[in-house]
Structure formats: C-alpha cells, structure tokens
C-alpha cells in the first residue's frame, strides 16, 4: 500500500520551510513512501499485552493554520469537536473563540470571544456538538451557552452550584456533554465537604436544561474523582527540605491515583499502579450512570528501571527551579548565591522512587469514546508512544507520534491532532488511521 501526503487546505509563503520542518515528524508517524501496514490481528479483542498490539500508521489528509497570517493561524488550540457533517469546531486560546471549518478546511465563521456577557467566555470553554447544536461551558463563571451549528447564540445561562446528598458539602458542576434529549449532563469540578463523613456520600450527575435549570439526576458517582479529592488516608508524598536558607521540593514519582474521565453515559477510569517488576499494568474501566461496570480490562507492558541519570535529572530540575514558593519561603533563584550542584546532591539523598518506571504518562478521552493513552518517554525524545483503547475497551493498536502532537478528536477512521512546529506555531491536522 502506498502512503501519500494530501495537499494542505491552507497554504502560505512559508510552506516550503514548514514542509522541511515537518518531514521528521511525518517519518515518526510511520508514514513511508511505500510499504504495507501491519495486518489486523485476528484475536484483537483478546489482546492484553501492549507490545502485541498492531502498529497503526497515519496518513495526513488536511492541515489548518498559518505561520504568519493571524486570520487563519492559531495561537493555542485548546479543544476540537466534529459534527455529523464533518464540520470542525476549533477553540482558539487567543480570544476564547470557537472557529468553524468545513470538512475541506474552508472557514465558515467564528463565535464566542472574550467577555462576561451571554455567548461570551471568561476562560477557555469546554464545548461539544450534538444534533446540529453547539454547547459551551465556561468554567470560570459557570455559564452554559447553546449555539446553532452556524454559531448563532440560542441561550446562555449560569448554572447554580448544588448540595451533595445529606447536605454534607457543596458541589460545583460543569456540563460534560449533551444527551439524546438535549439536556446537559454535569460532572463535578469542585467538591467542598462540611463534615468528616462527607466523603462517603455519593455525588449526583445532574441533568440541566438550556435555561440552566436542574431537570433531574442522571446517576451517581460513588465518590469524588480521586484526583479532585484524594481518598481518606492518601499521602501525596509531597516533601520540602531546607537547604542554605531556602526550601526545595524533593522530586516525587508519578501519582498512583487513577484518572477519571466524565462522559454523558457514565465515566472512564484509568488506573496506573507502580510496576513491581519487568512487567507493569494499567487498567481501563467503563462505568455506567447507574454505577455498574460495563467493562474493566487490564493491559500489560514492558517496564524500564529508573536509572541514576533519571534521578539526577529530576533532582537538578528541582534545584534549578525559580520563582517557586514552598510553605511561604522562596525556593531561591538560581545565581551566584546558589550552589546548584550541592542542592542537587542534597535532593538526591532524599529521593525515594520505586525501582521501575510507570509507563503511562497521561490520556486523552476523545468525544467518540476512544481513549488515547500516552506512554511515558524520555525527556527530550522527539516522539511519544500512544496506545488506543476503543469504546468497547478493546486494545485497538499503538503508534508513535511527534512529542508536540496531541489527539483532540477522533472517530473510527480519523484523528484530529494539534501539532506545533519548531517555532511553537500550532496546527490542526486531520489524519486517516491505517492498519
């Protein structure tokens, strides 16, 4: 099968230079002039080892952005949503606006913008599309807005915070999506407990209409997301020590708290325990609104031990950290008065890492239900490994992406990613998934 790069939808005078910059990234994606993609694995539904997953490749179909034209270029892409017609809704961080593009990349308009009024945003909004309408939630002011597919404002209301059942605390909420009835389903963004037993209370998943009024309860969470409110008895491991009259944070290994991703029909969890040997595991589970587990699959991967170099780099990074305040005391600015080498050695004496490195760094829950799990790479690596988990919990495949690439939206056949070039210019790229 021959892989080819498609023409870009938006070109500019710097195209030649950008092609030169992007060639290494294209190679990293596994795209070659010729060659066959790895055939699908017959028993893929039973795959549990990451290294056995089929390798996938990406073929670029569309690239949006500009190196030097602010009208078509982006400053920071914070979210992407795709509607049923293939139109792209792209959130740009410069003015908190949402831009609309046709499936071929043609600009179709923009809406939103910075402000506190109806249809405006005081922070980068979370948004999505469903049934020809665009919903957007402003985290900072709690406002929910509903727009037509063309960006016309239909409604804009502020969501009131609620109480946890038994009034053991307060709960602030934000929409995570719109259900089939056109109601917003919320996800907790903040929890404040008023008593010691409050953490045992379930958290409601509230349904809200376009007027901002509570309609009913869609379901309950057994408790708050662990990274929002750590469970009782959890020790973060945070430690700071005094060196030469300043305080420095002792490097800590990655947290073992699971990640939760809210969805309209429930939520996903990603558990990443520290590996205890040459093989590690991570577990992906899907839980329905009724609290029942739809699936829970554990996958294994090959681990690597932490090296002396890993620990020394972590210690040096904290030793050189500037403008950081710990416990009210400045960490100390790097300069002639700070012996960075001595601070590094002192921090090294305090480090307590597990023998093996956890493989999972982060994950992206795309609107279509796929979970893109990012594997941990070395600092300075040009590429990062990703594992794709399908909506039914199947290990779909793995691939390498440039370190500056991040999935934003996906379906069964395509992925929309943000990429930055050597000048930190962001691009939105649509790829077809092969393999």
Image (tube, rainbow, N blue to C red):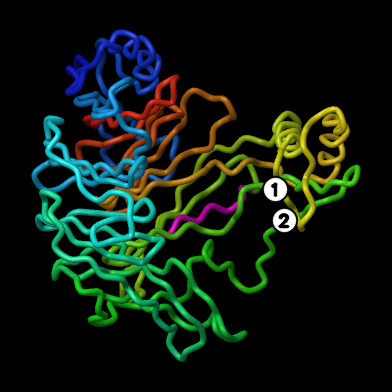
Q: Earlier in the sequence, mark 2 or mark 1?
A: 2
Residue 403 - label: none
**Numbered circle sitting on residue 238:** 2
Per the model, the C-alpha gap separating discs 2 and 1 is: 7 Å
Q: Quadrant of the N terminus?
A: top left
Would you say residue 265 is visible in this rendering?
yes
Q: Is residue 229 left or right of residue 292?
A: right
Residue at image position (48%, 66%) is 225
Badge 1: how crowded within 10 Å, few (<14), some, or many (20+)? some
x and y, in percent, of residue 212 in the image: 25, 74
Q: Which mark is residue 252?
A: 1
For the residue pair 411 and 40, the one nearer the viewer reads as 411
Residue 90 image point, x, y percent: 25, 42
Q: Nearer the viewer, residue 68 or 217?
A: 68
Image: 288 above or below 129: below
Residue 375 appears left or right of 412: right
Q: Which residues are magenta?
A: 269-275
Q: Residue at x 72, y 57 (%)?
A: 237
């Amino acid at each position: 099968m021959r892989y080819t790069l498609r023409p870009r939808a938006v070109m500019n005078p710097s195209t030649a230079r950008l092609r030169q910059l992007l060639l290494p990234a294209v190679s990293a994606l596994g795209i070659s002039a010729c060659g066959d993609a790895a055939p699908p694995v017959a028993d893929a539904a039973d795959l549990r080892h990451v290294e056995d997953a089929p390798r996938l490749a990406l073929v670029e179909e569309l690239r949006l952005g500009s190196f030097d034209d602010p009208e078509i270029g982006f400053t920071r892409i914070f979210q992407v949503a795709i509607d049923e017609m293939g139109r792209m809704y792209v959130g740009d961080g410069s003015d908190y606006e949402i831009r609309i593009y046709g499936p071929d990349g043609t600009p179709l308009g923009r809406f939103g913008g910075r402000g506190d009024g109806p249809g405006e945003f005081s922070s980068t909004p979370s948004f999505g599309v469903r049934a020809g309408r665009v919903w957007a939630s402003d985290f900072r002011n709690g406002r929910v807005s509903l727009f037509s597919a063309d960006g016309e404002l239909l409604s804009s209301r502020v969501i009131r915070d609620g109480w946890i059942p038994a009034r053991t605390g307060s709960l602030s909420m934000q929409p995570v999506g719109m259900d089939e009835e056109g109601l917003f389903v919320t996800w907790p963004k903040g929890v404040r407990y008023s008593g010691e037993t409050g953490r045992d209370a379930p958290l409601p998943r509230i349904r809200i209409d376009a007027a901002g009024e509570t309609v009913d309860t869609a379901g309950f969470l057994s408790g708050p997301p662990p990274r929002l409110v750590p469970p009782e008895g959890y020790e973060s491991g945070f430690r700071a020590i005094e060196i030469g009259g300043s305080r420095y944070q002792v490097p800590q290994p990655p947290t073992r708290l699971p990640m939760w991703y809210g969805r309209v029909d429930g939520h996903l969890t990603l558990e990443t325990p520290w590996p205890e040997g040459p093989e590690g595991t991570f577990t992906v589970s899907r839980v329905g609104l009724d609290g029942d587990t739809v699936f829970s699959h554990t996958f294994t991967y090959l681990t690597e031990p932490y090296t002396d170099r890993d620990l020394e780099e972590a210690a040096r990074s904290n030793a050189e950290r500037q403008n950081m305040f710990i416990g009210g005391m400045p960490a100390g600015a790097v300069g002639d008065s700070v012996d960075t080498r001595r601070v590094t050695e002192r921090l090294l004496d305090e480090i307590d890492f597990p023998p093996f490195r956890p493989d999972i760094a982060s994950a992206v829950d795309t609107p279509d239900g796929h979970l893109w799990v990012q594997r941990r790479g070395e600092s300075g690596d040009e590429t990062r490994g990703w594992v794709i988990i399908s909506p039914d919990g199947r290990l779909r495949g793995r691939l390498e992406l440039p370190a500056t690439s991040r999935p934003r939206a996906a379906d069964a056949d395509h992925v929309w990613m943000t990429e930055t070039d050597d000048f930190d210019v962001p691009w939105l790229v649509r790829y077809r998934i092969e393999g």
